[in-house]
Image (cartoon, rainbow, N blue to C red):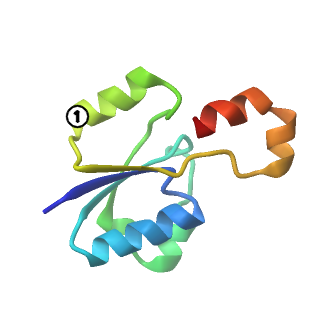
């Protein structure tokens, strides 16, 4: 069974990708910066929240990502964690740049 990590799984695209990978027989892991407080409403709405292993990590922090990958090796990584708020991207341009590079 292939394992996939979706960074930014709490968003719309992350949830739909998780659903697709689960349908293809993947073991799906997801990370979100807001893991401890997030509701993961998109995963709940699709009825797949209980089929995904969630992790807290900060994608712009190399040691955070490496620590996760050492604990949970995966075959594929999808990074969907970029800044999605246009207003926030103008207020915090450096953070936005970091989140998409």
Q: How many marks?
A: 1
Viewer-side residue, 100 vs 91: 100
Q: Horizontal and vertical percent for residue 5?
A: 34, 50
For label 1, the SS is: helix
Residue 94, picture quadrant: top right
Residue furthest out toward the left: 1
Vertical arrangement, residue 59 with respect to residue 16, above or below? above
Q: Horizontal and vertical percent for residue 101?
A: 57, 35
Residue at x 52% of width, y 77% of height: 45
Q: In the shown orientation, is residue 45 left or right of residue 66?
A: right
Residue at x 48% of width, y 67% of height: 15
Q: Horizontal and vertical percent for residue 12?
A: 58, 66
Residue 66, picture quadrant: top left
Q: Horizontal and vertical percent for residue 24?
A: 25, 75
Q: In the shown orientation, is residue 50 left or right of residue 15?
A: left
Residue furthest out toward the front: 101
Viewer-side residue, 71 vs 14: 14
Quarter of the image where the N terminus is located: bottom left
Q: In the shown orientation, is residue 47 left or right of residue 80?
A: left
Vertical arrangement, residue 28 with respect to residue 55, above or below? below
Residue at x 39% of width, y 21% of height: 63
Label 1: how many Cα within 10 Å (few below 14, some 14–19, many 20+): few
Q: In the shown orientation, is residue 82 left or right of residue 32?
A: right
- The residue to which callout 1 is attached is 71
Residue furthest out toward the top: 63
Residue at x 68% of width, y 33% of height: 97
Viewer-side residue, 66 vs 100: 100
Vertical arrangement, residue 78 with respect to residue 46, above or below? above
């Amino acid at each position: 069974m292939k394992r996939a990590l979706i960074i930014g799984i709490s968003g719309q695209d992350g949830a739909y990708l998780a659903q697709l990978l689960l349908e293809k027989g993947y073991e799906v892991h997801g990370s979100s910066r807001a893991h401890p407080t997030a509701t993961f409403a998109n995963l709940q709405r699709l009825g797949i929240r209980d089929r995904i292993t969630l992790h807290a990590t900060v994608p712009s922090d190399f040691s955070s990502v490496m620590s996760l990958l050492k604990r949970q090796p995966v075959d594929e990584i999808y990074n969907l964690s970029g800044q999605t708020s246009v207003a926030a991207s103008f207020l915090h341009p450096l953070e936005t740049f970091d989140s998409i590079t």
